[in-house]
Amino acid sequence: VSYQDISFDKVTVRGWHDGLAAKVRGTQNLHEATKHLPLEFFVMTTSILSVLSLATQSAYTAANNFQDQFARYRRRLGLPATPAQFGFVNDVGNLSTDTTTLDLMARNKVMTESNSYFLRLLEPAFLPQTTDSASDPLAAATYVTYMDPAHMLADHRNSNDLGIRSATTPRWYSDARVSHVIRAFNDALHHDTDDATSALQDSGLSSIAQLCNAFDAVMQKARNAAPGPEQVAYQAEAHSFVATAICDTVASMLLLDPAAVNPARAVSDHGVDSLIAAELRNWFHVALGYKISIVDLLDPRMSITALARQITLV
Amino acid sequence: MLWLTSTGMVVGRSPNGAVVGGLLRTLSTESPTGRFCSIDLDADHFALADSQQTGGLVRVLAEREVALQQSQDGKSIEDREFAWHSGCLWVCRLVPEPALSSYAQPLVTPTTHNTELLPLTVQGPVRAAFETPGILSSLYFRPYTELRQQPLPHDWIEVKVDTVGLNWKDLLLATGRFDGNNVSSEFAGIITQVGVDAASRFAVGDPVYGLGRGHFGNYTRVPAAFARKANPEDDLTQVVTMPVVYMTAVYAFEHLTRLRRGQSVLIQSASGGVGLGAIQLARAKGAQIFAMAGSQEKLEFLVETVGLPPSNVIAAGDVAGLNRAVKATCNRGFDVILSTAHGDGLHDTIQALAPLGHLIDIGRVDVEDAKSVGLELFQKSVSFSSFNLARVVDHDPELGAELMAAVDDHYRAGHISPIHPLAITDIAQLNQTLLAFSKGKHVGKHVVTFKPDSLVRMVQAPPAVTFDPEACYIITGGLSGLGRSIIQWMGDRGARELVVLSRRGPSAPEAQTLIDTLSKSDIHVHPIACDLSSEEQVVQAIKQASMIRPVKVSFTAPCPTRIFPSTR
């Protein structure tokens, strides 16, 4: 099975259909072929990527979301169905040793767990699930695993201990659907007495907010300064601030030493590919309020210094 | 972009709108500057039931559109997907499900799950476990999930336990001084399930007693060969005292040696279960019985209650007493000694053997510790045997069945009777009982009853799944990686017929190895080549599967996403 691995604007019609074939057509076909049988369970293991909505995974995300909703459809018909959403299994299968995938999971703070964890959480899929949700009687149709605030906290501490600072916040953190999970994670961070003060500063969300504020402040100064040498000085300060921020972010996404990022060169020269570019572009938007196309971002003639100059133009 | 669909997805009308929702999720990650929002209506072709609803919807659509036009900082939490039904807009939230979080724990112990005092029968089969191996007071009960995860072997029975007999060896196992993965070894109860090969001898509902390894479970599964039917008038708390002690005695007196009328037999640790059983069997055979015990009370018990002449009762370690007893055998010594002695005691005991005598060691301490014995002790043409009943039965199940049959026959013929005195305690006091038993001061036998409403310290573990060996399970997703581990996992939980649909089917290189490995455990994997996106092939494959067994579960194993960075 081959999935589309490129951003949606480059996906061909054929590629889109192929991407949906196994999960969407496959689920429909299995449903049609078995609906006359007295099945006890119709279990679909789907991917948590449909919650995380990572860049370049449009067909896969759509197909998984289809399976999740297909369970509601079957349940309305009175047929059994349970899609169980899982994250990344890190010790079985080809992907568990694929560095591109592992890096992607790490950058997006996706919880990865072992095969035995996966099997333990597969168990409830085969047991009758009940729900007491009055507003959504079909809520028990799906359950999501690999979304554990305690685990997120442990991972976060772990990265802190290893001195890995993340410059970016995964986009899924701001998806309202997971807001309870993120709130629980943030609460856990606050109550984490071991490093109560540093936790606040190091949480991905707050580090971006700090960067954002600092950027606004430095830009404000440059804008408000009287034209002349004073403004030139402030503009240079803003320029160097942004260039440093870009270098730091590129370094953290590529797991490089910040000193290894050369501001005189383009981001693509440092190994930013289209997959990372989609995430980097999100960072430009959130942290610096700057809209940039993938083409411009990956332009080999556009050095980091030039990029910073463009952003800081008053 | 505001994308409207009309599929009634949330209420299960149709899943087709989900593709759009999934696509928009990715699009908004890929283009952070774009604004996307989707609303799915619970209606056919956007035809809402009444005009009032339509008005409400239009207002909401306008609000969403305005919201989309406003710039967004990308930091705050944002709803991008909505459902319209029952006259209002709904959003989706993931909420924690406590019932599921207990599955995330790798181990179920009192520390992770807390214990509660619960009635024994509250959650089906339960068994004893020790939080700290070897520490009797750390005893607790937990769901006996593994009991029914595999189909019952053909020559086994499943029993709802009424009573369990305690033996010294069980205690050594529980305290970790002996190695083995059971803590109880005999049972009496009512049959709840019978394997095919045992159906000629047993039926569900039969009362039975016998030898069988267990964990103080309220249910147990045991080989049928070591069980015998109890009569309706039998008291199960009585018959449960017999299997271990009398099988030991029968093996010692009828197999290792042939105890005959008039022969002299010395029985050590005579006031315990095995000792009292051996006395009964030796009596039935007309042997002259000498008995040893470790305390004054026990010696008095042997004289007053068991009825041995005072001259035939010897205190353990009393060498003079032993010599007096030897004199009483016309200085010949004992023809048979059932020994639990070790160290110097064992040495003295061997010297008390008559020519051609037979010392049978059941204490096993020196044997387990690999102590040496001087061969000069065998100058009188004596024999030395040492055995552990569990090993005998393991190595020669046929002999084990014969021993249990002999016990039952002797009992029915009136040669032997259940062990007395008998201390009956309930499973609710199991840890106190084990502690009391470990002091070694008791005479006779301890049995533990299983009253259904007994309160025990129990861990509430999440329910576990068991698959039906008679059903066929369809799995898609192939035979390697996660598919493989799921197949194995289902087999571990009782599934026996697994149809695996994959593109390559049986020709996949990993297929044959997996099939061969699992067929050894009687798990049959049937790979079928099938392109899931072809309706015709799927229908054909399901037909094929239905011919094997009735299909019970369809299961799509994960197809892992493959992620590549595209080249620039």
Image (cartoon, rainbow, N blue to C red):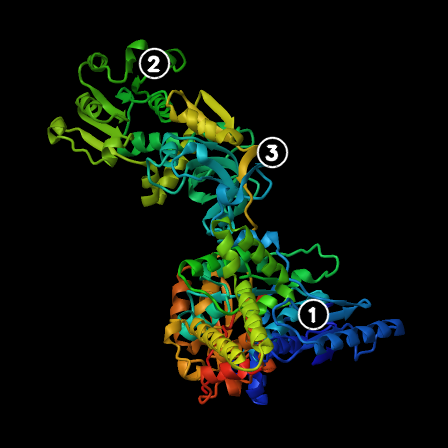
Q: Residue at x 85, y 75 (%)?
A: B54
Would you say residue B543 is visible in this rendering?
no
Badge 1 and badge 3 in a common chain: no
Q: According to the image, label 2 marks what residue?
A: B299
Residue A174 position, x and y percent, is 61, 67
Alpha carbon distance from label 2 to label 3: 39 Å
Q: Nearer the viewer, mark 1 or mark 3?
A: 1
The label on residue B453 is 3
Amino acid type at image mark 3: Asp
The residues tagged by marks 1 and 3 sit, at their Cα atoms, a distance apart of 44 Å
Residue at the spot of label 1: A73
Q: Amino acid at mark 2?
A: Leu
Tell me the element at label 3: loop
Chain of the residue where label 3 is placed in the rendered structure: B
Q: Nearer the viewer, residue A261 or A119?
A: A261
Which residue in the rendered view is the most extreme toward the right? B51
Q: Position of residue A229 (x, y in %)?
A: 51, 81
SS category of the residue bearing label 2: helix
Q: Chain of mark 1?
A: A
